[in-house]
Image: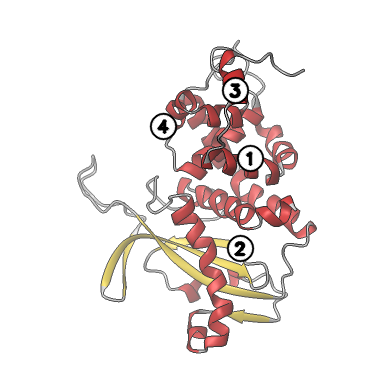
Amino acid sequence: MPKQMTFASLAHATKKKVTRREKFLAEMEAVVPWSRLLALIEPHYPKMGCKGGRPAMPLEVMLRIYCLQQWYALSDPLAEESLYDSDAMRRFAGLELGEDRIPDESTILNFRHLLERHALTEAIFGEVNAYLAEQGMTLRSGTLVDATIIDAPSSTKNQAGKRDPEMSSTKKGNDWYFGMKAHVGVDADSGLVHSLETTTARVHDSRVWDELLHGHETSVWADKAYVNRLIAKVRARVEHPFRVLKRQFGYIKTRYRGLARNRAQLSRNRAQLFSLFVLGNLYLVRRRLMA
């Protein structure tokens, strides 16, 4: 049953200008396969709130807030504040100010930890890519392999007095970087990321080569392919996901300390990268999906 419109909703309905944020959220509303993702998470989602007695927030509300966090680089506290400040974000999450309970930062954090604890962001990555394959978006004829460096705070002004022990330094050109690497395998035809591995910054791309191939390639391109201008035009497609990650979604620095030591227990940074890249895939083909 639809909710009764508040005065704020009525005012929004009569305004004439559609903002850039509203346009973006409307596009993502249309292309995210919500029902499939909800079915994936629902078995792990608590029916009651952590304090007992009070019902948990609706799962779809929390999933939408999590997506907002990835698209706008929002911390848990800032995500809570944004829901109070932005009518567009509240509307996307399905919340009415004054009518619905706005989840606090602890509730938002607990949902993020639930996804991490059950490795659900990697499962979402696979589910969305399966959905895109069903739509004919991934042909899997060839793979482009590349990596991007994600900076991490190098300061030692913390409780331990040390830099993050699970990050490392590497030199690119004449510059030194401290952080981690996101290694991706990108479909040569669609430009979509089909595989992801994370390492510290010093690990060479060749160390994770096998993990980035799906095994049915007819061709593979790596960095040395840039010597050929024709091949370089194909290789340029691997830069599109990185551009979306860093320019569109604003993910240029790690938010959490530490990397996963194995695939069984994803770290927070690794989990977030799975979410970012799969949402980036949907963003890259949003107009084709909407058409």
Dot placed on the residue nearer the N-terminal end, 3 or 1? 1
Residue, disc 4: 78
* Mark 2 burial class by Cα count in 10 Å: few <14, some 14-19, many 20+: many
Q: Position of residue 259 (x, y in %)?
A: 43, 53
Badge number at residue 195? 2
- Residue in the image at 72% along x and 65% along y: 138
**What is the spatial separation of the Cα atoms under label 2 and label 1, in whole angstroms?**
27 Å
**What is the spatial separation of the Cα atoms under label 3 and label 1, in whole angstroms?**
15 Å
Instruction: Specify the amino acid type for callout 1.
Output: Ala
**What is the spatial separation of the Cα atoms under label 1 and label 4, in whole angstroms?**
22 Å
**What is the spatial separation of the Cα atoms under label 4 and label 3, in whole angstroms?**
17 Å
Dot placed on the residue nearer the N-terminal end, 4 or 3? 4
Pick the residue in front: 43 or 231.
Answer: 231
Instruction: Specify the amino acid type for callout 2.
Output: Ser
Q: Where is residue 237 in the image (x, y as percent from the top left)?
A: 57, 71
Residue 29 in view (yes/no): yes
Pick the residue in front: 114 or 134.
Answer: 134
Instruction: Specify the amino acid type for callout 3.
Output: Leu
